[in-house]
Amino acid sequence: MPKSLKLGTVLTYLTFIISFGIYLLTLERTVSLWDCGEFIASATGLQIGHPPGAPLYAMVARVFAAVAPGSQHVALFVNSFSALASALTITFLYKSILLLFAISAKNEVKSQLAIQLSAFAAAMTFAFTDTFWFSAVEAEVYAFSLLFTAACFWAVLKWYTLEDGNIHSRWLILIAYLCGLSYGVHLLNLLIIPAILFLIISKCYHLSTGKKLLAIAVSSLGVGAVMYFFVPLLLWVISRIELLFVNQIGLPYNSGTLFGVFAIFGAMGWLVWFSFTKGHAKTFLFTVSFALFTLGFASYAMVLIRGIQNPPMNQNQPDNIFSLKYYLDRDQYGKTPLLYGPYYSAPVKAVVADEPIYVKIDGRYEIKGYTSKVKYYSSHCTIFPRMHSNVPNHIGSYRSWADIQEDSVTYKTVDGKAFKEIKPTFTQNLTFFAGYQMWWMYFRYLLWNFSGRQNEFYGNGNILNGNFITGFPAIDNLMLGPQNELPDAYKNNAANNRYFLIPLLLGLIGIYYQWKRHENLFITTLLLFFFTGIAIVLFLNQTPLQARERDYAYVGSFYVFAIWIGYGLLFLSKKLEKIKARSLRNIAALSFIAVPALVLAQNYDDHDRSGRSIALNYAKNFLNSVPKNSLLVVYGDNDTFPVWYAQMVEGVRQDVKVVNSNYLPTSWQPGQLAYKTYTNDGFKMDGRSLYTIPDEFRHTTGKDSLMPPVPLQIAMLQIFSSDSANRVPSPLQKGKMVRYLPQDVIVLPGLTRKDSNNIYLANNQILSKEQIIYLDIINRNYPERTISYAQTVPEQSYKLLQRNLSRVGLNHELIIRAADSTDSVNRAATLRSYKFLMNHFSFDKLDKPQLLDEVSVRCIASYRTAFIRTAAALANAGDTAKATALIAKCNKNIPVETIPLGSKEPVMVKLLLDLKQNRDALLLVNYLSKENLQMLHFIEKLNSFQKRYVFAEKALALQNLDSFAEILVAHGYTQQAMKIKQQIDKYDK
């Protein structure tokens, strides 16, 4: 026994040390892409991130940020927090598997070495799986969230083994508190509640088959009771008290909230005291657990406190209980139908007011608008709606995944005329659910982690990108075509990981073995697997064409599968006992380590981020190319959160105000532009008070008239006028009156009325709230302060101003100019862009080996847009020397071998030939032609079914080759063009 204890202690330490060591070695040294920059910035300054927030994560990560020796090391220290949380998670996993073995497989295997190694190998296998490792080396909430899940699961197993039927347990109280705390990290941890409840019920009561089904149902309702009853009820009660105290009694804002919180905890404290003094043990346990569960939510006090203080990042501005409720409800993301709702083609019947929106006005709360709710015709609604989005791109994907033929169904009849719209069948609805949501968005990810991964290219159903593989050519070639014939860029991808089905088969064996050994424990782990995997699929109801792979959301279910891998290894250990020689049995048990070793070896190269600084450089390049004290408008996650990090944490260009264009239509973001942040004074805006009223300024409209052009200053006075006559019916919302502009030409500052660079409006043209804010800022601040739009911002955002934008670096800078001076202004902007790109641009050191996932490649590749367009502008102006130097710098620092040209292939070839860089151009043509021909050769090897999934890739390859041939002919290289055309003829069948 002492030996086994010693072995267990050694392996426990090894589990933590090895995993933590590997994570530290592969840790990203600075900010990562996606949400990481936001999380680091929110932790560093205790700021308010995107809904529903992660206040506990921010507060704990703040400790790590505080001990960093300098601002440049903050990201490293916060990233290390994820590594630490992940290593602790693996330790809890190892201990949990041992507890499960002790409960369900006692005396099954005699060798303690085999038992310990089975648990150790399973835990370490999960430590190096693709999804978990990804979150372990960056500043994201998922590592910390899974630590709570692992700790809760270990604690309930500890209670199960130690308390022997006694429900009055400190372990259950601990679990309740941990679950409450985890709410301040991520809602995913609440999904452990059904598994915990079932295990408790099964321990305390003898369950027949019928009672087990009832226990499963009751346990499953637990998480719904918390999310849809308890939390909303808590917020509703406090909000009613707040309304009473402020509107009726006249006390200050948040006085009712403070009283409500103290009253609720006071009532809970009294119940705890009463049950304790009366000796009601079960009541005492329940009330203490419930009180601590509720106390765990107290981390959201930070959100309210900091929201009132208005830090630079203050998303949704939750400074009272009502805005906190909107924040927790994620209202800005809209509602997704779950049990009943419309198909994508459902006609809108009406848009109705839903919940009131309370706004702080003159010491009171007033209703200033309502959230809207769309009602659809029931003929085009269904139970369990999976194809619900009416976004055009989504509709095309729905039809593709479900193979939909367009049949119309009548939805209403008016004056004897039937109105029809397309309606999918319920079978097609389920086909999309099974094919896309279940297979593509869940089971594919499961197989990524335990069978193998094709590559890290984002996939949407074709056979080239993001599929799972097995490592066995016979299987992989049958599914995805001959893998040895793949183009080099695919074949040599770092994320081409093969596990030869070993972890998957062990897990499947483990499922069977655990079920046979202990049915109640199997149901417990199955519930945890279901709710952290398939239930999330059901709840998210994801649309096609997601912005990124979503495997991180299901990591809890992969955690459970690792438990089953442990059971699979334990099953093998039992079989190994047939070997008589003890030394051979021990050697066979030691071979279990080969499973995590295989996963580690395969995954290391595509998870080592130790040499990267891509996100930070990307952010600096946006910030450093804008004028002093200007407004930088950004758009997506990857050009917003890294920029926030660079500015808020490392202090880069704190004179610049940064705003995400997606947030400008909200009621909270526009007003924040008027606040001073760091060294940037707030922007002056005439409509500031109107922007904060939710239903006041969704849009306005222009009306074609005979009135003369109006200066921008007068136009803004007209738009902001409170005169009731300044209203017309909205072109977008029936029954809604909106402000309007009675002129069709807005004269920009410094321009004459007849200048073609003014703003010209069509009749009934919609001016969005976002566009009005830009005009307001220009009116009050230009030319002292200007606006720059990141090149990632959609054209619709700046369309009104497009004739007055000039490219400088990665941004489009607003420089209002007369039409006849456009060329000279653009020339000056091009020279500024040239100087910035040549002398101040931050490049990643791509000459050194480093991990370049697809998103990182896209970010770096986007630099070429600035280089190519600036070089083209210089060439058109006759300055070929500067253009040549710029392209040479681009190709040296962004080599095509590392960062593919993509759609820029023909553009780069033509530009090099135009600049007389013929040798470089021909070498590039040869390299790119080889790549495109490799793609065509691979497609030629596919069977007719597989070819259906690569039409776009074939068309693009042929188009590139055809473009090369045309460009070569135009520049006198007829012979080279003929060789390419011969290849085109070979494959263009």
Image (spheres, rainbow, N blue to C red):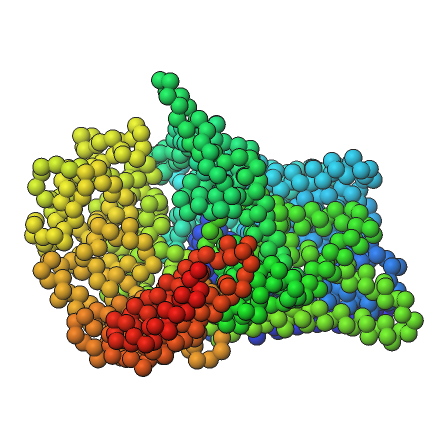
Residue most extreme to the top: 415
Q: Residue at x 68, y 55 (%)?
A: 560
| Front-lying residue, 530 or 904 | 904
The residue drawn where x is 53% and y is 37% is 385
Left or right: residue 565 compared with residue 134: right
Return the x and y of residue 372 as percentages of the image width and height: 40, 34
In x, y percent, where is residue 470? 64, 63
**Which residue is at 32% across, 54% downward?**
794
Q: Position of residue 593 (x, y in %)?
A: 73, 71
Residue 88 shows in this picture: no
Q: Residue furthest bottom?
A: 919
Instruction: Specify whether 523 is left or right of 183.
Output: right
Q: Is residue 75 above or below residue 785?
A: below
Q: With respect to residue 772, does 267 lie above or below?
A: above
Task: Out of 711 and 806, give the one closest to the viewer.
Answer: 806
Is any part of residue 54 visible from this angle?
A: yes
Kindly indicate the quadrant of the structure image that contains residue 135: bottom right
**Residue 690 occupies quadrant:** top left
> Is 319 on the left or on the right of 287, as rendered?
left
> Please, is residue 127 above or below residue 355 in the view?
below
- Residue 384 in which image quadrant: top right
Split into 4 quadrants, where in the image is the N terminus? bottom right
Q: Nearer the viewer, residue 239 or 930?
A: 930
Q: Residue at x 40, y 35 (%)?
A: 371
